[in-house]
Structure formats: structure tokens, C-alpha cells
Image (cartoon, rainbow, N blue to C red):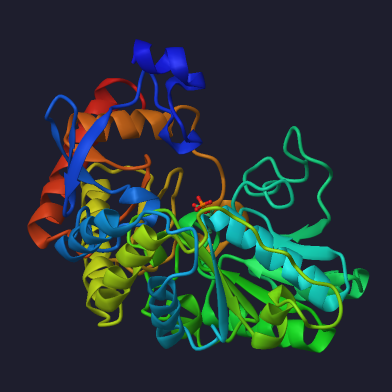
Amino acid sequence: MIRAQKVFPEGVTHVAREMHPFPVLIARGRGSQKWTVEGVELTDLMMGHGALLLGHSHPDVVRAVQAQVALSTHPGGSTELEIEWAEAVQRLIPSAERIRFVSSGTEAAMMAVRLARIFTGKRTLLRFQGHFHGWSDGLISEANPPYGQAEPGVQPPEFETVKPGCLDRVEQAFIRRPDLAAVILEPTGGHWGEVPLGASFLQGLRELCTHYGALLICDEVITGFRVAPGGAQQKFGVRPDLTVLAKVLAGGLPGGAVAGREDIMDLLSAGKPGPRLRHPGTFNGNPVSAAAGIAALKIVATGEPQRLADAAASRLRHGVNAVIQEERLPWRAYGTFSDVHIRTNYHGPQPDDAEFIPCGGDFDELSRPHPEGLVNASRQAMLLEGVDWFGLRGVTSAAHTDQVIDATVTAFGRAIHRLRSDGWI
Ligand SMILES: Cc1ncc(COP(=O)(O)O)c(C=O)c1O
């Protein structure tokens, strides 16, 4: 770790990897498991920050990547692979009339917003508190509490922010701000579904956007291909104007995309009258990512990985809630797809239902910060029991078997004892 601190601020390369006193270093992964440089086996509930729906090192993805690396990592031109990758996206997501590949979700969200501004001729964006759309200057603020202030170092953003979940509040914003170009959201709720949103909210947003002449942008960086082969838009039956994609899209390699209506995406075309969005980017449509993405999306299309990952998360929530009740903790595990979140300081009902959403899904209740230090402590306690999660939050994959989940529940029980004896709970 001293080596890492000599090269990286905080010794890490991503804010979510910060851990005190120091983070573990991971050497390799397979399926639901990964191993530290010391050879310690961990069950993984980070899953490549959500990118690894199929688990670590799926053999089809590994084969595709190995073959492509030997051919070319960057041909300096267009490839057949990028066409095949885009066709796979089109087959799964009907609103993807046209596609552009970028290198990350951050870039994709940035492009979607720029397209919306050019297309509508309006400036302002409607956002929801707690919804994360990457870390570009235009979108990073308002993703984390305290809300209502810009992130250090960025210009005051051009957006209007409201609490998620209430269509009236959205309509009021439209009335207040006739210059709204688009509404952007994480369709299953911010912070990986910490404050879940349902089909009716999304459908209502669709209607409001159409009525007030704004675009609906679904940020499906997490939900795309994960909550259904066609993402949250398939699950909820809503057709956005633009979709932001990354993570599962590239099968565990870097990659992102904007997909959407042909008339909007045409703003990227030369030769059309009017303003144009010029789109550079050295690694756009990179063939190694394309090869991995094609291999992954073939499996995604069967619907089987989503079924397995959802079932694993449901079993995990169920087991964790049983431990919580045994230990008489004021906590509740919940989630709506292959995710698990723990609400601390919870005193409501504890039904035997892994799909139950506590606090009626209320934004203020579910987004309340956990007691100081508990997220890091819970991450450490689980690590000592052989599980890596974000701390009070995790995500499953198709590779998490019943046996792995049951062992994870046992680890959670032991971690609770550690937290108790250390005075955290
Ligand atoms: C919903 C959402 N949008 C955008 C991003 C940014 O994606 P990337 O990390 O690929 O830049 C993330 C990353 O976690 C995300 O969860």
C-alpha cells in the first residue's frame, strides 16, 4: 500500500475503491470469485462496478478478446466488429435506431445531453437528486448529498434538479422552465436503485417530455442489459429518445454508447443542414471491446443471465434479512433487480418478502446517509469474512450460485458479530 500511496492520491484510482486503512489488491477473478495478490479468495459483490453480469472471465468473452488482441487492438479505421456490436445492441433495444460508441458511460451521458441541446435548441436539463450520470463537468453535481451545491472545480451547471418519484414536481419544473431540453434519469433509481422508481413514474415522464417538447434520456449504464435484455426501457415499457449505455455493453471491457432516434442521432452526420455534433475519441468502437461486447450480448439476449443474477440477489436479500431479524438489528435489505441495499436506522415492518421496498420507497428516508464510518467498517468486516461489497450495498451476477449466496449470508452474519464487538452497531 505504501507503494500505491506514492503514486496515487489516497492510494487508489477510483473514489469507490477508497478504503481505510488501505484497500486490497486484486490479482484475478473467475465467475463470482476473485483473489487478492496474497491469494485470498473473495466472493465478489462489486462485479466490475456492475459491468460483469456474466461473472469474471466468462470463457466466451476471454476467447473473443484473446483472438482480437492478436489481430489488432486499434486498426486506425472502421471495423466490421463495431457494426456487428451495434447490430447486437439494435436487436436488444428497439429505441436504438442509431448508435455511436464512446469509451465510457461518462462520455456517453455527455454526448446525449449535447445532442438534446442541439436538437431542441434549449439549454437546461432536468435532473433528479441522487442520480449519477458520470463525472463530466455538466453532470457530476447533484449525484451525491449534500444536494443543492455544485461540485468543486466545475462551472455552475445548467440544470434544474428535483427529487425523484413525483411527477407533479417534474411538471412544475417544466412550467417554471420552458427552456428544458431533456430529462435524464437512472430508470431504476439513483445509486444503483437505492431509491427505486417504478414503471408508472417512467411512463409519466415519457408523457411529460412529449407534451413539453423535451427529450427523455434514459441512463442505462447500470440497467442496460442487466434488468432485462432490453434494459429498464423493456422492463417498464417505455421508449426513450436517447439511451446512455456502458458497463455490460462491452462485456467487462471499457466502452460506452449513445443510442436513440435516427433524427436526433443524425446531428452527428456530415452533410445535413444545420449544426453538427463533431465526435472524436481515439478508442471509440475499439475492436477488443467490440469483440467482448458481441460475445457478452449473445448470452445477454437469452435472458438467462438476468434471471440468474436477479434470483441470486433475491436469495441474498432474503438471507440477509433473516440474519438482520435474528440479530434484532434496525436494518432492512432490499432491491428491485440484481442489487442489494441495506437501509440502516429502519424501524418499519419486516415482511418475509425479498422484494419489499422499505419506507414506501420514500426518497428522503432511503437516501439518508448511514452512520459515519459504517459503510467502510461493513466493507472491512465482510472482507475479513471473504466477501467484497461496496459496504451495505452489492450487485450479483449470473455466476452467483445458491451455494455462493448461502455462504455470503453466513459471512454477513459473522461480519455483524465483528461490527458488534468493535462497537459499530
Ligand atoms: C448510471 C451511471 N451513469 C453513468 C456512469 C458513468 O459510467 P463510466 O464509469 O463508464 O464513466 C455510471 C458509472 O457507474 C453510472 O452508474
Q: Is residue 33 visible?
A: yes
In the displayed structure image, the side of residue 22 where residue 398 appears, left or right: left
> Looking at the picture, how far across and down is residue 251, in whole percent?
33, 62
> Looking at the picture, how far across and down is residue 343, in whole percent?
43, 49
Picture layout, residue 184 above or below residue 88: above
Q: Nearer the viewer, residue 247 or 202?
A: 247
> Looking at the picture, how far across and down is residue 337, in whole percent?
36, 68
Q: Is residue 360 visible?
A: no
At a point 67% along the width and 63% down the height, the residue shown is 279
At a point 42% along the width and 81% down the height, the residue shown is 230
Quarter holding the C terminus is top left
Q: Nearer the viewer, residue 403 or 65?
A: 65
> Looking at the picture, how far across and down is residue 255, in whole percent?
46, 58
At a point 36% along the width and 10% down the height, the residue shown is 2
Q: Nearer the viewer, residue 305 or 323?
A: 305
Q: Quadrant of residue 280?
A: bottom right
Q: Quadrant of residue 418?
A: top left
